[in-house]
């Protein structure tokens, strides 16, 4: 074996090792970026910026007396409440068993519609998105307040993003793959409207 053949073999062997290292590094990069992009969606609303929320008090009023008889709701009837935020220009209907909390302490304002099992529905409003995602594609498949949305689904939650008048709105429903909560999420999201478009 000559010296030039030995040098060529050494360079070829180094080239193969370098190529294998590059391919392995690329594989790790793609694997990690895939893992990171899956982790960008928060698996429950408690992982969003979460200082202690304060309970929004319910107005205390008595209905005016009615001359016609009224029927009281039966336990099987679903009761809804309306909430309007003039500050953030939206209104929404939600199930009456949920408690409403408002949190203004972070980079966005959060309206938390909480139930006892932590299957929270949260509306985030701010100048920036409340969660990180590499690219949002808005379409008209589902609309929030007559605006196109970006929808993201995982096994545990559904997220709708939209923009309106310079603000970014996120409706986040933690449903933990419950069919009933998924249905409630869609109805909750469909009830979302911008006040100035009514």
Image: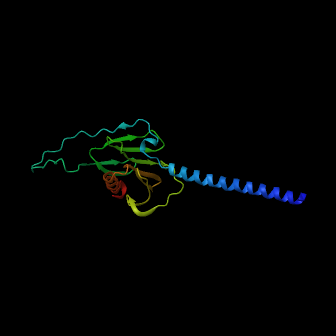
Q: Nearer the viewer, residue 84 or 138?
A: 138
Residue that lies at the very extreme toward the bottom in this rendered image: 140
Q: Quadrant of the N terminus?
A: bottom right
Q: Nearer the viewer, residue 50 or 87?
A: 50
**Left-right relation of 17 to 55:** right
Could you say where residue 167 lies in the image, as x and y percent from the top left? 46, 52
Q: Where 5 falls versus 170 (above or below)?
A: below
Could you say where residue 92 lies in the image, as x and y percent from the top left? 33, 51
Could you say where residue 63 lies in the image, as x and y percent from the top left? 18, 44
Q: Residue at x 72, y 57 (%)?
A: 19
Residue 97 sits in which quadrant? top left
**Left-right relation of 89 to 24:** left
Residue that lies at the very extreme toward the front in this rendered image: 1
Q: Residue at x 46, y 52 (%)?
A: 168
Colour scheme shown = rainbow
Q: Quadrant of the C terminus?
A: bottom left
**Total of numbered circles in the picture?**
0
Could you say where residue 30 lies in the image, as x and y percent from the top left? 60, 54
**Left-right relation of 16 to 33:** right
Residue 163 sits in which quadrant? bottom left
Q: Nearer the viewer, residue 188 or 39?
A: 39
Q: Residue at x 62, y 55 (%)?
A: 27
């Amino acid at each position: 074996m000559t010296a030039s053949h030995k040098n060529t073999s050494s360079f070829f062997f180094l080239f193969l090792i370098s190529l294998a290292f590059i391919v392995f590094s690329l594989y790790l990069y793609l694997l990690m970026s895939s893992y990171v992009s899956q982790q960008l969606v928060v698996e429950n609303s408690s992982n969003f910026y979460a200082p202690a929320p304060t309970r929004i008090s319910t107005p205390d009023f008595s209905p005016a007396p009615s001359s016609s008889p009224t029927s009281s709701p039966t336990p099987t009837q679903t009761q809804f409440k309306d909430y309007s935020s003039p500050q953030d220009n939206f209104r929404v209907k939600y199930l009456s068993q949920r408690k409403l909390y408002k949190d203004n302490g972070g980079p966005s304002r959060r309206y938390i519609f909480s139930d006892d099992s932590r299957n929270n529905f949260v509306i985030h409003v701010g100048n920036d998105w409340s969660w990180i995602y590499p690219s949002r594609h808005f379409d008209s498949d589902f609309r929030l307040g007559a605006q196109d949305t970006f929808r993201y689904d995982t096994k545990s939650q559904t997220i709708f993003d939209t923009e309106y008048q310079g603000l970014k709105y996120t409706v986040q429903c933690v449903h933990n793959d419950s069919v009933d909560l998924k249905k409630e999420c869609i109805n909750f999201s469909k009830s979302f409207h911008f006040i100035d478009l009514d």
